[in-house]
Image (cartoon, grey):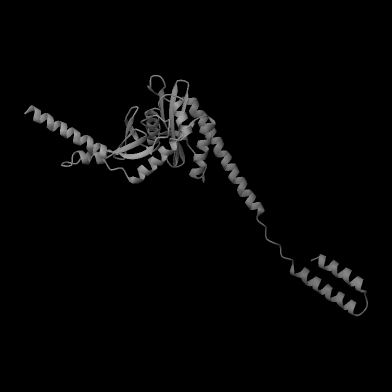
Amino acid sequence: MKRTGARLMAALLGAVCIAAAAQDRNLAALPGGVSASEAIELARASLVARGWKILLSDATSVTAESGGSRIRVHAVGDALRYADQADAAVRQRSDAPDTRFVPIPPEQITVLRADIVSALGLDAVREVRAGPAAPRATFVEGQVLIDNLPPGMSEAQVMRAVRDALVGRRWVILPSAPGEVTARLRKGVNNTTLRVLRDGNLLRYVDNTKIRVTQDMSEVPDRWISNLRSDIRRHLEEIRIADNARAQRRTTAEPGPVAAQPASGAANATERLRTLKQLFDSGAITQGEYDSKRAEILRGL
């Protein structure tokens, strides 16, 4: 009886493993020389940049949640693969499907795949190798970075100012969702990932800072935020001035209305030309005198 129960349990576990494996789908191929841990590091950063909440992570896999969906990304051989936990739950318990998880929309997988493929580029891999593993971030509600954005400035202009300010302070730009910029800075004992996003007329930042050695939670230093705030304002002002200068050049280049000649002046010139022609026809003036006086009258129009 015990042997029968053991066999049934082994069969059940085998079926569960097969079902879970069947849900694995290709996410991205690993470039030559990129280790599993480096690939997972970049996949974690891509998930965080897209607003996923990291639940579990190790050197070969990362599990995250977003909008009721749950994904597990793991390295297998020379590829990154993913499993949609909603699919896995249905396969594993077909008699009583677990509906706790929402299937991941295909467009989210498409965007995530593009982010990870881009992140697996040589520069990003070098950045990962330059320091310890990225923070396993769970972002909290953002704090105000800029409280009064210039009116009429587009989202693209605002994000460009943010990106330029971060790069100027040696932050490394990570894959970012539209309308926001995510960046990382490792300096001193701090390992910081900062997410800057627009909220109407505000810019907010979401801070995830850890002590590099202990991985204990910390806070981004106030002077870092102060420097970024000052630099972003400066870049926004430069964009505003450049826009105004372009508008001024367009206004100056447009030709103004041509002033109409007074009707009395035109009538007077016509009369003078008529009189001049009569004098010439009567022989009172020569051809040269006629031509000279006619040219003078015409120049006065």
Give x and y (percent) for residue 222: 47, 25
Q: Residue furthest left?
A: 1
Q: Where is the C terminus found, in terms of image quarters?
A: bottom right
Instruction: State the count of labels.
Output: 0
Residue 218, quarter of the rendered image: top left
Q: Residue furthest bottom?
A: 282
* Observer-nearest of 237 and 64: 64
Give x and y (percent) for residue 102: 27, 42
* Observer-nearest of 289 and 89: 89
* Observer-nearest of 6 and 39: 6
Q: Which residue is found at the position 63% from the left and 52% from the top?
A: 250
Q: Is residue 193 visible?
A: yes
Instruction: Please indicate whether residue 18 sits to the left or right of residue 208 in the image.
Output: left
Q: Which residue is found at the position 60% from the left and 46% from the top?
A: 244
* Observer-nearest of 158 and 60: 60
Q: Which residue is found at the position 43% from the left and 33% from the top?
A: 32
Instruction: Please indicate whether residue 107 sits to the left or right of residue 265 in the image.
Output: left
Q: Where is the N terminus found, in terms of image quarters?
A: top left
Give x and y (percent) for residue 144: 44, 34
Q: Is residue 149 visible?
A: no
Give x and y (percent) for residue 68: 29, 40
Residue 292, quarter of the rendered image: bottom right
